[in-house]
Image (tube, rainbow, N blue to C red):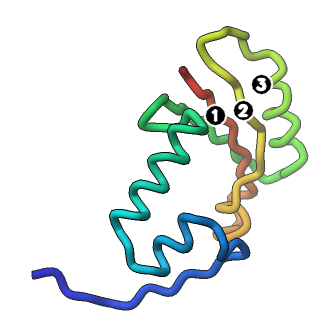
Amino acid sequence: MIARGQVYLQSYMTENNVMQSLADQGRDAFSAVELESRQFADMPPFSRLAGVILSGKNEKSVEALGRTLVQTAPRSDDFTVMGPAVTCISRCYADDTGDVCLFSLHAR
């Protein structure tokens, strides 16, 4: 038997279908909404993603390197290069290792 517990969610988008499904404790509804939105956005499991994480002590240097990598990345109809974007991880877990910059390849 699975023990029941409490989960607290915080969101700026409480009207979002996913948030509504979770708030209503509708696991099946949540799964259906999430799968539909992923299919519409061509996200996994309907495609593949590969991420590259860059880190360093100087946020501007890391962002500049990320922009350079995106600008010099090969181009193809088979994938899309997205980013760079500063991840929330760097804000949530900031320490002396520096900020983190992320970009990903979206393969169709």
Looking at the image, which residue is at 56% across and 71% down? 19
Q: Which quadrant holds residue 40?
A: top right
Q: Are marks 3 and 1 in contact (CB under 8 Å)?
A: no
Residue found 76% across the figure and 37% down from its top? 83
Q: Which residue is mark 2?
A: 82
- The residue located at (84%, 51%) in the rendering is 59
Instruction: Find residue 90 and report its horizontal and vertical position in percent.
Output: 70, 61
| Relative horizontal placement of residue 53, taking residue 37 as reference (left or right) | right
Regarding mark 3 in the picture, which secondary structure is present there?
helix
**Circle 1 sits on which residue?**
104
Q: Which residue is mark 3?
A: 69
The C terminus lies in quadrant: top right
Mark before the other along the chain sequence, 2 or 3: 3
Contact flag, marks 1 and 2 (Cβ < 8 Å):
yes
Local crowd size for mark 1, using a 10 Å CA cut-off: few (<14), some (14–19), many (≥20): some
Marks 2 and 3 sit apart, C-alpha to C-alpha, by 11 Å
Q: How far apart are the alpha carbons under marks 3 and 1?
A: 11 Å
Report the amino acid beneath label 3. Answer: Leu
Classify 10 Å Cα crowding around label 3: few (below 14), some (14-19), many (20 and above).
some
Split into 4 quadrants, where in the image is the N terminus? bottom left
Residue type of the residue flagged with mark 1: Ser
In this view, 57 is above or below 17:
above
Question: On the picture, is 87 further left or further right than 6?
Answer: right
